[in-house]
Image (cartoon, helix red, strand yellow):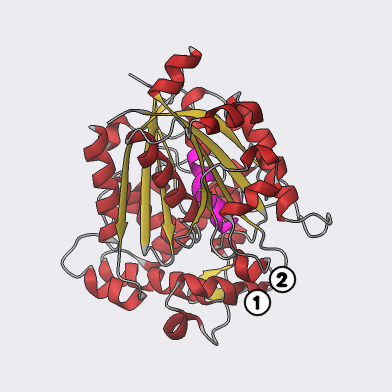
Amino acid sequence: MSKVYILGGAQTDFERNWKKEGKNMVALLKEAIADGFANAEITLDDVRELNKDNRVACFVGNFIAEKYTEQGHLGAFLTEVDPAFYGVPSARYEAACASSSVAIDAAQTKIMSGEYDLAIVVGWELMKTVDSKLGGDFLGRAAYYKKEGEGIDLPFPKLFGKLADETLKKYPQLDEKRYMDALARISVINYENAKRNPLAQTRKWFMSFEQASTRGTDTNPLVGGKLAVSDCSQVTDGAAVVVLCSEKFIEEHGIKGKPIIKGYGHRVAPMLFDKKMSDNAESMYILPWTRQAVLDAFRRSGLTVDDIDCFETHDCFTSSEYAAISSFGITEPGKEYEAIENGTIAFGGSKPINASGGLIGCGHPVGASGARMFLDLYKQVTGQAGAYQVKGVKNAMMLNIGGSATTNYVFIVGEDK
């Protein structure tokens, strides 16, 4: 199978509120694609030329624009960006918060099979079109809505609060205070990392360990079980674009030094959270299908955790990042706190997680998060991450989940060596 190269891409500033700016989804897409093309050094004329021979396609990741913006048929909406997209194959891909990872997977598959030579992946979501209560209800569709979301205020904080409870239950040797303090430190790390990222939503925000560890107060109210506001990712407007290409495209244009997709994993767990927990009874891992997706990516790449220099993970809540630490293989399951307490996952640690700030710090426009994480892997491997660049990155790994870790996507990006 052909190698899949990454030419580049871009994300919008996740601090922005597009509704307040009076701008809609077309404006968002136009800006993201213009910036993504500029970084990848391709043009709309390239799209026109390649489309003559059916060598280019577009892949759009979005979760639930039908609710947030009253619009479906999102693949076709790229024709509103520019006439260059007339005739270009384009479709929308959806898997809740892993929607743009599905789009990346579809794009890489088409390139690997020789169908297309250029693939444009666009992940996006506009979430600030409604209030937080209604938005939380919309997001409940990423769970089993009739059983886990309907009529429940903010269902996902409650589900990931249950993950915190189940983690303590699964690992009885884990002291509750130690665990909750570890979650607070995850929050602090991500907020600190976000301050280095000029496109992060919370780059001007404040978070300290005292604030994050003092839950159930006026300034840090509980939102789901043991979890408080400091444990949550953000409601975010934004888009991310990633441009992939074939070996043939690389050779035709004499392009050098671009990284490749080295491995991927894709596994789906039971839809209902309670069934996930019963499913893990025979496993050491709280989320065994998440761990399996990581193992699949390692198998396909021929790499191990020792080869990975930095990670981006799906910290929709601190409890999900905690579970990711052992899923990546950084620690044994049940001992994730060790990598937090000893600084392993901090920005200057040996296995830094979420140098970008993650979903808690950078932001979480749900349909864009997979593409944004993937773009940050590209930035790290190519040394383009600026103030949040991790030193000496040759290989980087991401975990993007949809629902309550129902859809699990892992990608490894690395130097073409």
Q: Is residue 286 above or below residue 250?
A: below
Q: Secondary structure at mark 1?
A: helix
Query: Which secondary structure type mostly characterizes the magenta part of the structure?
Result: helix
Q: Which residue position is annotated with label 1?
A: 134
Q: Looking at the picture, how far across and down is residue 69, in whole percent?
A: 68, 66
Residue 367 on the magenta segment: yes
Q: Residue at x 29, y 47 (%)?
A: 294
- Relative placement, left or right, of 355 versus 310 is right
Q: Amino acid at mark 2?
A: Val
Q: Quadrant of residue 203?
A: top right
User: Mark 2 and 1 residues: CB-CB less than 8 Å, in contact?
Assistant: yes
Task: Report which residue position mark 2 lands on.
Answer: 130
Q: Position of residue 105 (x, y in %)?
A: 39, 45
In the image, residue 50 sits, relative to residue 312, either above or below, namely: above
Question: In front here: 331 or 103?
Answer: 103
Q: Which amino acid does the dot numbered 1 rest on?
A: Leu
Question: Going 57% across and 76% down the picture, which residue do you hit?
Answer: 154
Q: Position of residue 406 (x, y in %)?
A: 36, 65
Residue at disc 2, secondary structure: loop
Check the image and name the residue furthest to the bottom: 151
208 relative to 15 in the view: left or right = left
Q: Quadrant of residue 277?
A: bottom left
Q: Nearer the viewer, residue 206 or 236?
A: 236
At label 1, counting other C-alpha atoms closer than 10 Å, the crowd grade (few under 14, some 14-19, many 20 or more) is: some
Structural distance between the alpha carbons of marks 2 and 1 = 6 Å
Q: Which segment is the magenta one?
A: 363-374
Q: Is residue 240 visible?
A: yes
* Viewer-nearest residue: 396 or 26: 26
In the image: residue 10, left or right of residue 353: right
Q: Quadrant of the C terminus?
A: top left
Residue 341 in the image, given as x and y percentages of width and height:
41, 48
Q: Is residue 365 left or right of residue 272?
A: right
